[in-house]
Image (cartoon, helix red, strand yellow):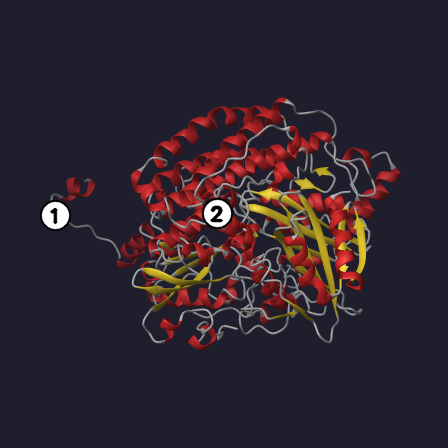
Amino acid sequence: MTVVEKAVAKLQRALGESVLSVEEFRGQTSVTLDPEAVVNACQMLRDDAELDFNFLAALTAVDYWPSEPRFKIVYQLYSLANKEFIGLRAQLSNESPEISTIESIYPNANWHEREVFDMFGVTFKDHSDQRRIIMPYDWEGHPLRKDYPLGYEEVQFTFNFDEIDKRKPYAKE
Amino acid sequence: MLEQNLEITVDELRHLVSDRALEGETMLLNMGPQHPSTHGVLRLLLELDGERIVTCVPDIGFLHTGIEKSMETKAYEKALVMTDRMDYLNNLGNNLCYCLAVEKLVDLDVPERAMAIRVLLVELQRIASHLVFLATHGLDTGAMSVFLYCFREREVILDIFEMCSGARMMTSFFRPGGLWRDVPDGFEEAVRSFVESFPKRIKMYEDLLTKNPIYTHRTQGIGAISSEEALKWGLTGPPLRATGLAWDLRKSNPYSGYERYDFEIPVGVNGDTYDRYTVRIGEMRQSLRIVEQVLDTLPGGPVRSDNRKFVPPPRSELGHSMEAVIHHFKLWTEGFPAPKGSVFVAVESPRGELGCYLEGDGGPKPYRVHFRTPSFATLQTLPMLCKDHLVADVVAIISSLDPVLGDSDR
Amino acid sequence: MGVETKLGNLGFVTTTLEKVVNWGRVRAMWPVLFGLACCAIEMMAAQSADYDMSRFGMELMRASPRQSDLMIVAGRLTRKMSPVLRRIYDQMPEPKYVIALGDCSSCGGIFNNYAVVPGVDEIVPVDVYIAGCPPRPEALIHGILTLYDKVENQKVKDWA
Ligand code: SF4
């Protein structure tokens, strides 16, 4: 039994119903959890001496607009002792994209969560410093949401040079 | 857009700075984003008590380029060019990370020769990146000549890249399923002559800095961190190894055939600025060892997978095979579909753990790409490292962390 | 020396004001150190031993915009950074010139999205555009020489 299998078994035993599904894809395991259970799961995975997932490797989100549940928060934990990755997933609906922060367990989640807040508009309960991190403070919208336009501008070629040149806002001295 | 207000009021910062700042007892100072030693466009808000730093609030995002969103609108192979521009000192390393993720997602295997050449080039890139670190670190701590020497050697490596791919920095040489093409004639000689000449150069840098009292006084004991703290805050790569913890993804979770090569993980003791420097110097030596081993054991054979569902056929086949024409057309107009599912791949970049989260939705474009970048994590530790140091030390600490802002902001 | 032998030790030469001033401007052009992204690394390479930009009188990269008369915008300019760029430009004393180094600063390059300004000419007036992603150091040197040509041919009536 590998460490990841053990971890999954332990999660299932401790959290019961809150473990919604376990997927294995290309040899990588990801556990989908009830959003409420993420903090407990992280705490367990980190503190269990055998599992020892002591490093938060990545934290991000995916937007499935327009389907529901809209957001998926992705956690990738790593165990230095066992040299294994495990993924946790939590799905959030569009109405209340909110989840508890795991800052108290992995302090480096702070910036990652700020980034997810900035880019997806998912809020983190009890986060110590929830400000935008990457976009300007007064930016409107959350760029990585799927309903946010890419902001493509028409490319200027020789055939449409003059036309675009007219409306290009050149700077003044 | 130009009216955007750059100043934020003290009220918004209330929870970030100490109470003394609000009473005007300490001074708030803005450093960056245009500052010669913030390595790009990092902005720091420093709270100073005289010369001493009370708090340091980093502000990133001045180089946010929307790379993740742009990649979602491009086919898998075409999105590769974006990764080059992310961490611009480790272009090939980013390519490698993304390629490994795509290969994992679609379950594509890579020929032996391609894997070996990938390792070779990535190690050269690591040396080049550490050379830029050394150059800028030297500049920031007052050693101008190191800058000139380091860039001289870096040119040699860039010439090798140019020889392979035609570009000095933005090579896009690795493609899902292998390499763009085989390395040209004269490649091995060029690398060999570099491998022969470079140890002397490393020694020269060490002569200039390692025992130099001007340098050691500015770096020893500055910005130290313990390994527990470092792990907690997600520090990886040389800054983590400088604390004495020998964690290197190349050893712990080998990818692209790293398990075949023999190398050591240099570690430091105190986790301070000086140790970060010695670790990087040690890493350059180890990289050189790997390069040498790859050269000695370089296997022959093809450099691209012949799985035509994912890898376009070579030009030579187009003339006489209808099937090749069809594959070529399909792959370049539409791209290949990837299955539904997500993978996470992590590689060791010169700055630390570079992770790629890639999710496919069955179509030819990635549904979501996320890069877990090392600079983002290292910059987060800056407030801790800078605390109670002098303003002049901040410069040394930043450069010893070697952040690349394109990497942290993406 | 040549003048002295021809005219005796008179100690003067005749020329036009225009020429002298333009000559002076070209021979000591101080760029402001303004590296934004990848192109800045190539700008550093152009400064270093192999390419040695100091041959053209510009070894002095000034960190302060108030001491410089040329801004090399090296790299992609984002929306968040654009007010900063304009502010730095406004602080430079006249006469000032701008070089857009690289595709990104010339036109947005491969980043056609919400975050990147499609060409710095929307923020500051640009004198010379240098193409390439990143441009080779030789291309930067060529661009600077092109700027010199432009400055040398300035007319008195155009002086600000
Ligand atoms: S033009 Fe290319 S090299 Fe220059 S900043 Fe843009 S992406 Fe980077």
Amino acid under disc 2:
Ile
User: Which badge, 2 or 1, is on the more N-terminal residue?
Assistant: 1
Q: The residue marked by circle 2 belongs to what chain?
A: C
Identify whether B405 is placed above or below A171: above
Query: Of B252 and C5, which appears nearest the observer?
Result: B252
- Residue B403, visible in the rendered structure: yes
On the image, the x and y values in percent for residue B89 come to: 53, 45
Query: How many other residues sit within 10 Å of disc 2, few (<14), some (14-19) or many (≥20)?
Result: many
- Horizontally, is A152 left or right of B215 in the view? right
Where is residue B44, by image quadrant?
A: bottom left
On the same chain, marks 2 and 1? The answer is yes
Quadrant holding the C terminus of chain B: bottom right
Q: Residue at x 65, y 65 (%)?
A: A153
Amino acid under disc 1:
Leu
Identify whether C29 is placed above or below B12: above
- Horizontally, is B365 left or right of C79 in the view? right
- Horizontally, is B18 left or right of B158 in the view? left
Which residue position is annotated with label 1? C10
Query: Of A7 and B118, which appears nearest the observer?
Result: A7
- Furthest-right residue in this view: B322
Identify whether B101 is placed above or below B112: below
Say the numbered circle drawn on residue C41.
2
- Horizontally, is C122 left or right of A2 in the view? left
On the image, the x and y values in percent for residue B251 come to: 62, 36
| CA distance for labels 2 and 1 | 49 Å
Where is residue B92, by image quadrant?
A: top right
For label 2, the SS is: helix
On the image, the x and y values in percent for residue B143 come to: 34, 42
